[in-house]
Every structure is written in C-alpha cells, then in structure tokens.
Image (cartoon, grey):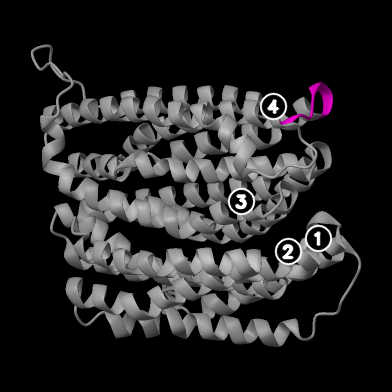
Amino acid sequence: MADVMSLKKNILGNYISQIYITLIGIAIVPLYLKYMGAEAYGLVGFFAMLQAWFSLLDMGLTPTMARETARFKGGATDALHYRRLVRALEGVFLIVALVGGGALFLLSDLIAHKWLKANILPISEIAISLNIMAIIVAMRWMGGLYRGVINGAEKLVWLSTFNSAVATLRFIGVLPVLIIVDSSPITFFQYQLIVAVIELTGLALKAYKIFPVLSINQPVRWAWLPLKPVLKFSLTIAFTSCVWVIVTQTDKLVLSKILSLADYGYFTLAVLVASGIMVVSGPISSAIMPRMANLEAQGRHDELIALYRKSTQFVVVLAGAAVTTLALGAEPLLYAWTGNIELAKEVAPILSLYTLGNGILVIAAFPYYMQYAKGDLSLHLVGNAIFIVLLVPTIVLVASEYQGVGAGYVWLGMNLLSFVAWIPLVHRKFEPGLNIRWYLNDILFIAIPIILSGILINRFIPHSESRLYLISQYAIFGVLLLAVGCLASSMIRERFKRFITKREWKCIT
C-alpha cells in the first residue's frame, strides 16, 4: 500500500510540475515575441535544439544512473558498488561536458555566419549569444546525472517542486530583465546562465543527500571498472537516445538552415505548443520507469504488467482529450493565444500535424518502458536502426521542399508507422498474449469515442472573435472529451465503482 501511495504522489507531483512548466513556457512566448522580436525568439528555439543535440553525448548514462539507483533501492546492488558507479559516471560527465561545451563554443562564429539567416540582429550579437548558449547547454546536461539519481530514488515530489521553481526563474523571472534592463538576446542568455548555475547546484546538493553513507575504510575513487557491468545497457540506451534526438530534431536542424531566423521562430512556436502533449506522458514515464525496474528486480511480474496497462489507459484518456482538442482547434486557439490571425493561419497546419504525431508517440513509448525495466533493449535497438534509415532522408527531402508542413507530415507518418508495425513485435517477445488486449482494451476502446465525440462537438462550436470566449469554449471542449475518455476506460470505471461502493458501505455502517 505504501508503494502504491508513493507512486500516486510521484505521478501527481510530476503532473502538477509538468503542467505548470509547460503552461508558463507556452504562455510566455507572446511576451518574448513582443519584447525580443521574432528573430531573437528564433535564437531561443535554436538554443532548445542545441540542448537536444548535445544529449547525443550522453551515451545512455543518465537513464543508466536512474535505473541503477532504482536497483540499489530495490536491493539488487550494494552501497559501495553503487557509490563507485556514481563516481565513475561523474568523471565521464565532467569530461564530456567540457569537451562538448567547448566544441559548441568554438563553433559559435561559424554557426552565426554560415548557418543562421538573420536580417535584423547583428552577427556579432548572435555569435556572443551562441557562446553563452554553449556554456548553459554543458551545465544543464551535467545536471542530468544528478537528475537521474533523484529520479531513480523516486524523490519525484521534490524534483517536481525544484523543476517548477527553476522554470519560474527561467521563463518568468527573465521578463523584468527584458523590460527594465535590456531586451537583447545577449542579456536574455546571460540571465539563463545564472539560472543554469542555480539549477546545477541544487540538483548536485540533493543527489549527494541521497547517496548512501560509506564507512571510512571504503574509499570511492574514480575508476573505469564500475562502468563495465552496465556498459552494454548504457550503449543500447545511447543508441536509442541518439535515434530519439535524430527523430525529433532533424526537422528542426534542417529548417534552421532553410528558414529565416524569424520564420524559424514561428516554426518553433508551433512545435512548442504541440510539445505540450508530451506533458501527458512525461510525469508517467518518470514515475513508472524506476518503479517497473524495481518490480522486475524483485520478480513481481504480474504487478509490473498491471502497472503497464493501467498507466497506458491513464495516458490514453489524457492524451486523447488533449490531442483532439488541440488538433481540431489549432487555428482559433493560436489566435486566442497570440492575438495575431495571420500567424494563427500560417502556424495552425504545422501545429495540428505535430500534435497528432506527439499524441501517437506518447502511447507508442510504452513498450520501451517495458524493455527498459527488463534491461533488454536489443529489439528496440534493431527497430530504431530501421526507422532511422527511413526517417532521416525522408525528413531532409520533404522538409527542404515543403518546409514546416512537410516536416509535420513526416513526423506524423513515422510515429504512426512505429505504432502499427513495431509494437506487436515487442509485445510478442516480452509479453505474449498481451498485444491485442493492449491495443483494443487499453487504447482503441478509449481513443475512438474521444475522437468521434470531438469531431461531432467541434461541428457545433460557434466561431467568435473574442479571444477569452475562444479559450473558454475549448477548455469546456477538452473537459467534455476528458469525461468521455474516463467513461470509456475500464480501469477508471472500475476505480469509480470501488469508490462508490466504499462510500455506500460507509453510509450503511
């Protein structure tokens, strides 16, 4: 019971944090556009992409750190072995941060002159901003090690609170600086550097409180040996992470070269809003991945599968309502958010396509969680190798010709292909007999009623020029679809029945 309550707290804390961070990150964009301009915001989008590409250097070590922390907590390894592994990983992370950040720093002038297309911002200002970005990216990536420790220890309520505080500093705290001090991108990134220092310090201090205390005769020195037992798993994760970055960031990299910096800013805006869908799965994956690894280490297989299926239904309910609302209401919602009808018309098709693709992705990610818990990502590695061979040339070709909309179609198509063609193979290997029940009971029986209800209701929504009215309309629209999803979910219906029965029994007694 304590484990269940802990998991519920972690999931709730994650959701509150992720929703808050996503909402303020999205809500603040019109103010960035107002005070900084579209080109400067394009630099912000380029900064986000750099962070993603920098994670290629992770080598699978961050998720390995989370998994080994969960295994230590589950009793699968001892304190001395765990601390030596942590020390080994700290050394690797520090070296990679210095090398990777230094390389980005040295390439800043080349990127400013040869890659980005600016019409207003001085090249020198862009180059200095890129220098600061390189330092921030290295520091925030270094924090991934300590974040993995906290995540694996399931201290997710603390992590959620900390993430929310840092996000408040990052997104909202910079506004007075832009308004009062200076609205240049250099000032913006100098402020973000200060926040990055605070973030890394906080994560490191918390991680060191989690580490087990060793006796004085158990020294923890850096050595390569502790990495060997986890190297195979780490490298498999590394390949998976590389594929993830290539899949999600190739379109952004290609378009950063093709589009002007201002147009790239608008494309970034569409992708940012669509990424709000990922908040549906992020808190769930952060909470259940260490728990599933823990259950697997203890041999509690039935509980692992039950958690897998219940979490799938929960995500389908939330994602189904959010995706349907955002995909069908893309243009009016963009207008309500920015107040710019031309921008809304231009960005809406891209937003709809990326929203649908992200909606499929959050469900298609579940078989990966199972493979992660079992420590066997060989099938995942093979599948990703195939998809990357198909994806990269397709994105480069289509995005070069059709820009943002073309990239959106490729994103949707590749995620749909993964969902239909690859997941059955994963289930067949790790849990034979689960596939049909998972597709039908846990996904389609929930998603189809939500989609059909959304299409029907959307036909009767009256058009309005009032931005507040539009927001209210689609908020109610989303709540209605959420209710439909809850009614369609067997897991939620069962929980509701137990709750009612319990209340009735209390009334009788």
Three-letter amino acid code of the residue under disc 3: Lys
| Residue 294, position as x, y percentages in the image | 22, 51
Q: Which mark is residue 347?
A: 2
Q: Are marks 4 and 1 in contact (CB under 8 Å)?
A: no
Q: Return the mark for residue 257.
A: 3
Which residue is situated farthest in the left direction here? 217
Instruction: Say which element carries label 4.
Output: helix
* The stretch drawn in magenta includes residue 321: no
- Residue that badge 4 annotates: 124
CA–CA distance in space, label 2 to label 3 = 19 Å
Quadrant of the image containing the C terminus: bottom left
Q: CA distance from mark 1 to mark 3?
A: 21 Å
Query: Where does residue 151 sit, x and y in percent of width and height?
Result: 36, 41
> Residue type at mark 1?
Leu
Q: Earlier in the sequence, mark 2 or mark 3?
A: 3
According to the image, label 1 marks what residue?
Answer: 343
Point out the tag, 4 or 2, that comes first from the N-terminus.
Answer: 4
Task: State the CA–CA distance, disc 4 to disc 2.
Answer: 30 Å
Give the alpha-carbon distance from disc 4 to disc 1, as whole Å: 29 Å
Prevalent SS, magenta region: helix
The residues colored magenta run 179-186
Q: Earlier in the sequence, mark 4 or mark 1?
A: 4
- Towards the viewer: 294 or 138: 138
Q: Residue at x 60, y 43 (%)?
A: 115
